[in-house]
């Protein structure tokens, strides 16, 4: 069984990576403190290769349709296989990887690995953009967007792009959606969902309830109108629309 986590940086994906490791899943030869498989330069470059085929339409809309029908670039496959060499080469019964940037190449990862187990890890976008992440400026990964000097807005646009690429990708054979908030506040129940999905016992890890709702104490801009659909869809507290862009 091979498992990967899809979710933007600062969506709490380290929690599921650490949980999988504690549950006996081999997550690669070298992990950093966030549970990311490193070094990750080859996967970063694969993001730039795939991004060449995403068309920016303006107004935070992207056309991903070409990704679903064109031949996958051989260079992309080489880079991904190079990044995953320790996972692919492992004889472990349960193995996988976690790196937030995998979300940027989700359409082609699904096509390369149609039978693996995907876990989509989501967090309230307002909490996700409180802190900085490598993917905050999508241009670093070859993705076109209307650049802004507003750092918080760049983070929000990055969150939106990754939400859109997830929705635009045909659903793989095996997919489970988990809210980070449920993992923290209802860990036992969420672990049972994961056990039913993966078919083996899951270990508990320490969690911090104070990591939920940090945006409420945040002085920066965190309400953006383009968060609305996802906030509604995943049952998060409504935005203060008077503050939203």
Image: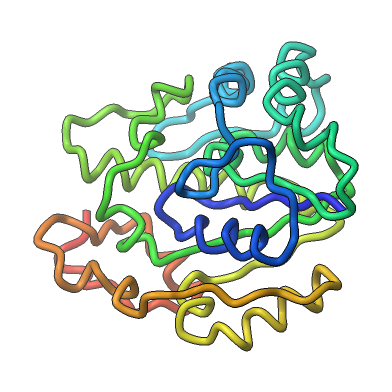
Residue at 32% across / 29% down in the picture? 146
Q: Residue furthest top?
A: 75
- Which residue sits at x=41%, y=48%? 159
Q: Is residue 122 above or below residue 54?
A: below
Q: Give the left or right position of residue 18, taking residue 200 as reference.
A: left
Q: Nearer the viewer, residue 71 or 80?
A: 80
x and y, in percent, of residue 187 in the image: 55, 83
33 over 212 or under it: above or below: above
- Residue sitting at the far left: 219
Q: Position of residue 44 (x, y in %)?
A: 54, 24
Question: From the viewer's perspective, is 19 left or right of 73?
Answer: left
Tell how many labels. Answer: 0
**Picture colour scheme:** rainbow
Which residue is nearer to you in this view: 30 or 150?
A: 30
Q: Position of residue 73 (x, y in %)?
A: 76, 15
The answer to whether residue 235 shows anywhere in this view is yes
Which image quarter is the N terminus in?
bottom right
Quarter where residue 84 is shown: top right
| Residue at point 56%, 32% (across, down) | 38
Vertical comparison of 205 with 71: above or below:
below
Q: 192 left or right of 123? A: right
Position of residue 16 relative to residue 184, above or below, is: above
Query: Image quadrant of residue 144?
Result: top left
What residue lies at 74% left-to-right and 56% top-to-bottom?
Answer: 25
Note whether residue 54 is visible: no
Q: Nearer the viewer, residue 45 or 53?
A: 45
Query: Could you say where residue 70 lies in the image, as x and y percent from the top left?
Result: 80, 22
């Amino acid at each position: 069984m091979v498992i990967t986590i899809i979710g933007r940086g600062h969506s709490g994906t380290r929690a599921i990576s650490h949980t999988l490791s504690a549950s006996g899943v081999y997550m690669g030869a070298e992990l950093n403190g966030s549970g990311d498989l490193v070094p990750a330069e080859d996967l970063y470059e694969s993001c730039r290769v795939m991004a060449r085929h995403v068309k920016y339409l303006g107004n935070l809309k992207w056309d991903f349709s070409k990704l679903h029908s064109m031949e996958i670039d051989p260079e992309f496959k080489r880079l991904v296989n190079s990044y995953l060499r320790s996972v692919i080469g492992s004889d472990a019964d349960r193995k996988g990887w976690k790196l937030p940037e995998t979300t940027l190449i989700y359409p082609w990862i699904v096509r390369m690995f149609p039978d693996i187990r995907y876990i989509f890890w989501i967090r309230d976008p307002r909490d996700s953009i409180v802190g900085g992440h490598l993917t905050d400026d999508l241009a670093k990964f070859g993705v076109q967007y209307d650049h802004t000097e507003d750092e918080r807005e760049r983070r929000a646009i990055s969150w939106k792009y990754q939400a859109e690429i997830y929705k635009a990708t045909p659903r793989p054979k095996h997919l489970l959606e988990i809210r980070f908030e449920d993992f923290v506040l209802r860990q036992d129940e969420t672990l049972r969902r994961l056990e039913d999905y993966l078919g083996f016992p899951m270990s508990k890890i320490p969690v911090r309830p104070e990591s939920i709702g940090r945006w409420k104490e945040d002085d920066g801009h965190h309400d953006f109108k383009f968060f609305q659909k996802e906030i509604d869809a995943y049952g998060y507290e409504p935005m203060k629309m008077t503050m939203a862009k």
